[in-house]
Image (tube, rainbow, N blue to C red):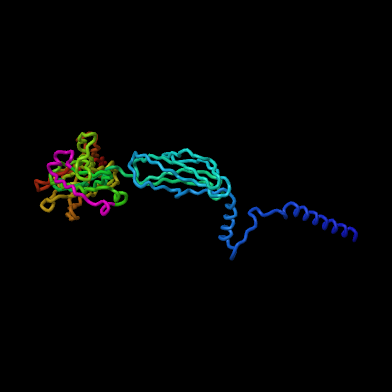
């Protein structure tokens, strides 16, 4: 038994010795992958990572984008084409291999002069682009693939601002909603990015009625002092203000403000092409607004304007246990609101529709009057579902002021009898 344990221990010792010898022969004499390195101070995750990066990059290919990988072209107009060349340099100790990667759809990556650079050599990568409308800023990019272990992908970027030769702010001018008999003011700013100066020669509306009622001013301003965003870089700017007297017809206004100008040199002389007068240039500004009668309603889910001052309240079908009254607000606007008294006029059908106006309340430039409309249930069902223009109930709001017209509220309903 003792001899058994002796031979077992001897076999284990021999096996351990042989395994150690094999392991030493294969691995112990080899240099570590990153090579030996020394480090001053304390070893921390940050300092260890830095040391490993230095060991990885030393003696290998390295890439550098001379003057940076981002090019800001400043300002360009929509449709303009741009081009920029990036300089790529090999700054490592081994050959730098380059390959073109992907690029955004609006950016074309130019041909790469060299696909492999010896240490110290450089090459060019050219990007071209076309500026499109729709945004105030522009950004495109392209990728350059390398064998630099610390920078396998180099992102080349193009950035800049987009502007038109002549731009208007806001893009559409208007006066909102005003009551008939009220004045209106329309204003905005025109910015010119043209290299030459422009000189306004005339400004008018496309609508003759507006021209008869309007007084229009065009004042030059300093874009660097009063502009914002990209507009501070404009060459010129003009503030336009149109004051319109009362008298515009009711309804939606959709017209254009037309400013004509000529291009002039530094001495104020008109610029001509091929010896011929180039004639006027035009800037068109959309103008929108709406003129309503002095009387209107505040819309709701069931109440809407259907015909420029004719309102429709839709009660729907009213069952025997459902409420059959509604509340809304009549709005009185304009200079005559303090000289006007409103009352309920005719209602239709009589005996079925009842309307009541509450006490008026001033709210800023308007007066609000609560209106309650009640449908009176009779013995028979009544339907006014708007199958034709006469198939509605109605409530008329009357005025004692001849300058304030009356207003109709159409009613759509079907009410069951008792």
Residue at point 22% right, 43% down?
A: 265
Regarding residue 302, the answer to whether it shows in the image is no
Quarter of the image where one finds residue 380: top left
x then y, percent, for residue 413: 25, 41
Q: Going by the image, does 76 lie left or right of 326?
A: right
Q: Quadrant of the C terminus?
A: top left
In magenta, the rendered stretch is 201-227
Count of labels shown? 0
Q: Nearer the viewer, residue 116 or 335?
A: 116
Residue found farthest to the bottom: 41
Regarding residue 338, the answer to whether it shows in the image is yes
x then y, percent, for residue 91: 53, 49
Q: Going by the image, does 199 lie left or right of 142?
A: left
Q: Nearer the viewer, residue 243 or 251?
A: 243
- Is 85 within the magenta? no
x then y, percent, for residue 408: 17, 42
Q: Quadrant of the N terminus?
A: bottom right
């Amino acid at each position: 038994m003792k001899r058994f344990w002796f031979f077992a221990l001897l076999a284990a010792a021999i096996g351990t010795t042989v395994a150690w010898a094999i392991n030493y022969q294969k691995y112990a004499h080899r240099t570590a992958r990153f090579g030996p390195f020394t480090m001053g101070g304390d070893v921390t995750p940050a300092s260890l990572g830095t040391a490993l990066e230095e060991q990885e990059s030393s003696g290998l290919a390295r890439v550098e984008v001379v003057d940076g990988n981002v090019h800001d072209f400043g300002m360009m107009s929509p449709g303009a084409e741009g081009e920029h060349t990036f300089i790529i340099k090999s700054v490592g100790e081994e050959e730098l291999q380059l390959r073109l990667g992907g690029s955004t759809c609006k950016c074309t990556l130019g041909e790469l002069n060299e696909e492999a650079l010896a240490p110290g050599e450089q090459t060019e990568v050219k990007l071209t682009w076309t500026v499109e409308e729709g945004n105030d800023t522009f950004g495109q990019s392209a990728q350059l693939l390398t064998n630099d272990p610390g920078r396998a992908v180099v992102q080349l970027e193009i950035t800049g601002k987009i502007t038109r030769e002549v731009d208007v702010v806001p893009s559409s001018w208007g006066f909102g909603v005003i009551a008939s008999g009220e004045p209106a003011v329309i204003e905005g700013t025109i910015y010119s990015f043209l290299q030459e100066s422009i000189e306004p020669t005339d400004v008018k509306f496309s609508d003759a009625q507006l021209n008869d009622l309007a007084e229009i001013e065009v004042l030059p301003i300093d874009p660097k002092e009063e502009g914002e965003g990209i507009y501070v870089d404009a060459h010129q700017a003009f503030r336009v203000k149109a004051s319109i007297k009362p008298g515009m017809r009711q309804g939606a206004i959709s017209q254009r403000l037309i400013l004509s100008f000529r291009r002039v040199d530094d001495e104020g002389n008109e610029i001509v092409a091929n010896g011929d007068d180039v004639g006027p240039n035009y800037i068109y500004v959309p103008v929108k607004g709406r003129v309503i009668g002095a009387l209107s309603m505040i819309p709701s889910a069931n109440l809407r304007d259907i015909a420029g001052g004719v309102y429709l309240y839709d009660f729907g079908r009213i069952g025997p246990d459902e409420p059959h009254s509604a509340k809304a607000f009549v709005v009185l606007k304009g200079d005559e609101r303090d000289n006007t008294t409103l009352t309920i006029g005719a209602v239709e059908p009589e005996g079925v529709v009842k309307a009541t106006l509450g006490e008026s309340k001033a709210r800023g430039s308007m007066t609000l009057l609560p209106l309650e409309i009640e449908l009176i249930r009779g013995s028979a069902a009544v339907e006014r579902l708007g199958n034709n223009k006469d198939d509605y109930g109605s409530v008329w709001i009357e005025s004692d002021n001849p300058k304030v017209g009356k207003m109709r509220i159409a009613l759509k309903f079907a009410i069951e009898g008792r």
